Amino acid sequence: MTRTGFDTALENLNEDLLRMGSIVEKQVHQCIVALVNQDEELAMQIIKNDDLVDDLQREIEDKCIRLIGKEQPLAIDLRTIFTISKIVTDLERMADHASNIAKAVKRLKNEVYIKELVDIPKMSLIVEKMIKKSLDSFISRDVEAIKEICKMDDEVDALYKGVFNDLLAIMAKDIKNLNQATQFILIASKLERIGDHVTNICEWNVYLVTGEHMDLNE
Amino acid sequence: MTRTGFDTALENLNEDLLRMGSIVEKQVHQCIVALVNQDEELAMQIIKNDDLVDDLQREIEDKCIRLIGKEQPLAIDLRTIFTISKIVTDLERMADHASNIAKAVKRLKNEVYIKELVDIPKMSLIVEKMIKKSLDSFISRDVEAIKEICKMDDEVDALYKGVFNDLLAIMAKDIKNLNQATQFILIASKLERIGDHVTNICEWNVYLVTGEHMDLNE
């Protein structure tokens, strides 16, 4: 493979990564839409789409390992491929959480919601933006953007604490709400976890640019 | 580096991985011991040890990338290093869950436990065994052992459902138990998640031996 061939292969990997990222972002968005609208059909679609995400992850990982084997890249090229192979793991886990939220939507389909879904949709909106920004930062190698993403993650964490307390109060009011509120707490905890995965991606972006590891997930 | 030099480096990586695995296994074990005994000091130790796990992960990842860059390994050698770099991600996430459980222990330190901790300690015992077995299977390249690990994961999932229902019933009995029972549900969900990480390791073990990807996490 010529240098141009290698660059094309790397470009191709970047595109795959962005494609996977945008599917995952959509999965996260849609699972909360399905939750809000109690849309079982959409939930089932999300669960099905999770297989596509898994396939895409494997495809990208295979390309990474083949490219390393074939081209024996060094320094920044090797770091780029290694970073991509790490980012897809986090993306896949995010999609996994979205799929698990969709499964909870199915369990909740016949419930009458006690109250608007506290701040869960708000958490989700921030998390979706974080996913997008983290991949933009990967492409643009913009390490500065990461500070903003970390601030957003702090916001998600704070919202999660609020959601947790709101839901405990809702449970305390009427034990009929127990199952529903507990499911909502678990959903919120998955969104919080998705935020953590985004900060993992940011750590890899920092590594890619600086060659240094950084702990953003405190 | 000679072939022997490479083998030594790989051997060294294997040892690092096992060392990390055994620390993670211990972290998972200890966080439940801390929970059972409401041992805040132990909980704080676990939270502190999590930094060691993070450092070890980075150290191993750095070794992987340096070894690839230096030796440009092919086929099984490359797959082995790639697999190690993937397994450490799952180990780190498990330790992360253990550390989060330890944080919950701190929050629960002054509570009088309503009841024995339902099946949480039982879940933990199985999960610890799963971690050990998955690393044994990596070292021995024993793909057969994976079937057994998957069965254990099914058991963990079933226990989780039971724990969830038991805790809902405990909440329903007395709303004073709400916070405590909700914390326990979240703890159980983290143990369930640790089990999923073990099956991810198993998937990598299968990949290592067969070159094929397999979805064990259904």
Image: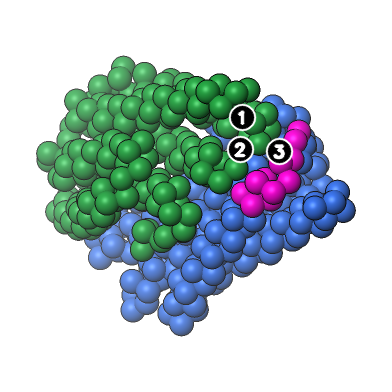
Chain colours: A blue, B green
Q: Position of residue B46 (x, y in %)?
A: 37, 23
Question: Could you classify mark 1 by the number of other residues whose Cα lies within 10 Å: few (under 14), some (14-19), or many (20 or more)?
Answer: some
Q: Position of residue A48 (x, y in %)?
A: 47, 74
Magenta stretch encompasses residue A127: no
Q: Say above or below: A165 vs B101.
A: below
Chain ID, mark 3: A
Measure the C-alpha gap from mark 2 to mark 1: 8 Å
The residue lying toward the viewer, choosing from A60 and A42, is A60
Chain ID, mark 1: B
Q: Dot 2 lies on which element?
A: loop
Question: Could you classify mark 3 by the number of other residues whose Cα lies within 10 Å: few (under 14), some (14-19), or many (20 or more)?
Answer: many
Q: Dot 3 lies on which element?
A: helix
The residue lying toward the viewer, choosing from B173 and A128, is A128
* Residues at circles 2 and 1 in contact by the CB criterion of under 8 Å: yes
Determine the residue positioned at 61% across, 29% down: B67
Left or right of A66, for residue B111: left
Residue type beneath disc 3:
Arg
Q: Say above or below: B182 vs B2.
A: below
Q: Position of residue B1 (x, y in %)?
A: 63, 22
Residue type beneath disc 1:
Leu
Measure the C-alpha gap from mark 3 to mark 2: 16 Å
Q: Would you identify the image quadrant in which residue B169 lies?
A: bottom left
Q: Is residue B117 visible?
A: yes
Residue that carries the numbered disc 1 in the rendered image: B67
Which mark, residue B73? 2
* Residues at circles 3 and 2 in contact by the CB criterion of under 8 Å: no
